[in-house]
């Protein structure tokens, strides 16, 4: 009994590009967002308000947010790790912010320079302020199945972070397989842990594809009723604090799978492939989506 409709949160402009070594012009990022919304994406993670010393690629956050021609019905989200990030982000009027924590202490330290408990303390006033201004709040739980420093992560650790996020008012949580080590049953266990504190429509899957298991993990998530996924057009990306990890599962590949199952997404696959080709051309890179490559070869 799979969901009839799935919401795709396109994270390519943020998760996909944050690790890109070459400079990417703000105009290319803006063009990507425009191409994505024209393809039917209704949730787009645009950028992040983090330290430009840590993630130089996102230093143009304000310019990118200001440059987007917004389409009604599209939700534009940005990452905000702390009060400073939120103060900067709100000037760009995002529809949604994302606070990002981890189920692993070591990863929390390396990624956001604080413990899990401290991260929740930092998020709490940000969440409160955002909600008071009518801005939606999502949370990301990194290393929900495995950590590059601590190895396997038990579902109980995911449950703990989900509980803490729920307590501070985070409306939706993403169960993130940061380094793509998840396999279907382990991913289901991590999702079940988050589902102890959130309803089914407030939990999403965020799967990096390092081991090529991300699509299988999407299917496994559908089996438990999950109907929201973060994906990255043309498979853009990697993680700056997780060596060797590849990008998120390609949006094209997930859309192709979902449509083949009769699940609606509202996304036009051909136009989505154009969006992926556009940013890959700007980067001078080959398309990382298997579906895009196959359809372009026809
Ligand atoms: P910190 O060093 O603990 O912060 O950084 P601090 O308060 O000690 O400040 C140090 C410096 O950073 C100061 O500047 C602050 O002003 C500045 P200085 O005086 O040295 O010039 N600063 C900021 N600048 C801009 N924006 C801010 C901000 N905050 C402080 N918001 C911080 C804490 C979180 C900012 C830092 O550790 C950081 O930027 N980390 C990068 C985190 C990141 O972007 N990671 C990648 C995204 S998460 C992800 O990809 C995972 C996800 O996809 C899910 C998954 O796959 O797992 C979501
Ligand atoms: Mg990610």
Image (cartoon, grey):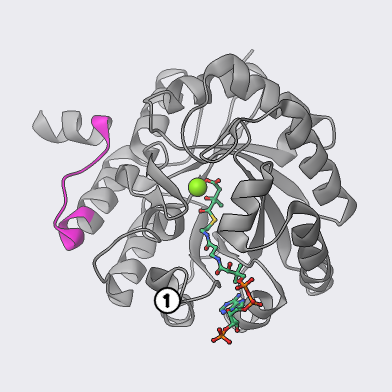
Quarter of the rendering occupied by the C terminus: top left
Q: Which residue is at the far right?
A: 167
Magenta residue span: 280-290
- Horizontal placement of 175 versus 242: left or right? right
What percent of the width, then of the height, locates residue 174?
64, 42
Residue 172 visible to an observer of this rendering:
yes
Residue at (36, 64) in percent of width and height: 34
Q: Is residue 58 above or below residue 45?
A: below
Residue at (45, 54) in percent of width and height: 15
Q: Which residue is at the far left?
A: 297
- Horizontal placement of 83 versus 288: left or right? right
Residue that label 1 marks: 64
Snapshot quadrant of residue 85: bottom right
How many numbered tags mark residues here? 1
User: Helix, strand or loop at disc 1?
Assistant: helix
Residue at (37, 58) in percent of width and height: 19
What percent of the width, then of the height, locates residue 41?
46, 50
Snapshot quadrant of residue 110: bottom right
- Horizontal placement of 78 versus 46: left or right? right
Q: Is residue 158 above or below residue 14?
A: above
What percent of the width, then of the height, locates residue 49?
55, 73
Comparing 85 with 104, the one in front is: 104
Residue at (85, 36) in percent of width and height: 197
């Amino acid at each position: 009994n799979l969901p009839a409709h799935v919401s795709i949160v396109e994270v390519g402009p943020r998760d996909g590009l944050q690790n890109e070594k070459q400079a990417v012009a703000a105009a290319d990022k803006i063009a990507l967002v425009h191409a994505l919304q024209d393809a039917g994406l209704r949730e787009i993670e645009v950028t992040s308000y983090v330290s430009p010393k840590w993630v130089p690629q996102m230093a143009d956050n304000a310019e990118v947010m200001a440059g987007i021609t917004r389409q009604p019905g599209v939700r534009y989200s940005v990452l905000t790790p702390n009060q400073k990030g939120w103060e900067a982000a709100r000037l760009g009027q995002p529809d949604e912010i994302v606070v990002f924590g981890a189920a692993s202490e070591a990863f929390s330290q390396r990624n956001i320079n604080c413990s899990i408990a401290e991260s929740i303390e930092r998020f709490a006033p940000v969440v409160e302020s955002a909600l008071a201004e009518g801005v939606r709040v999502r949370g990301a739980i990194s290393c929900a199945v495995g950590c590059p420093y601590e190895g396997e992560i038990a579902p109980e650790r995911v449950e703990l972070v989900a509980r803490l996020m729920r307590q501070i008012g985070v409306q939706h949580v993403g169960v993130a397989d940061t380094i793509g080590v998840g396999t279907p049953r382990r991913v289901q266990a991590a999702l079940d842990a988050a589902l102890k504190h959130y309803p089914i429509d407030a939990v999403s899957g965020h799967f990096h594809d390092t081991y090529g298991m991300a699509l299988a993990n999407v299917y496994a998530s559908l089996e438990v009723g999950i109907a929201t996924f973060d994906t990255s057009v043309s498979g853009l990306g990697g993680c700056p604090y997780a060596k060797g990890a590849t990008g998120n599962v390609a949006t094209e590949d997930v859309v192709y799978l979902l449509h083949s199952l009769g699940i609606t997404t509202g996304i036009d696959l051909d136009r989505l492939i154009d969006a992926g080709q556009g940013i890959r051309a700007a980067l001078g890179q080959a398309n990382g989506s298997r579906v895009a490559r196959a359809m372009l070869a026809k």
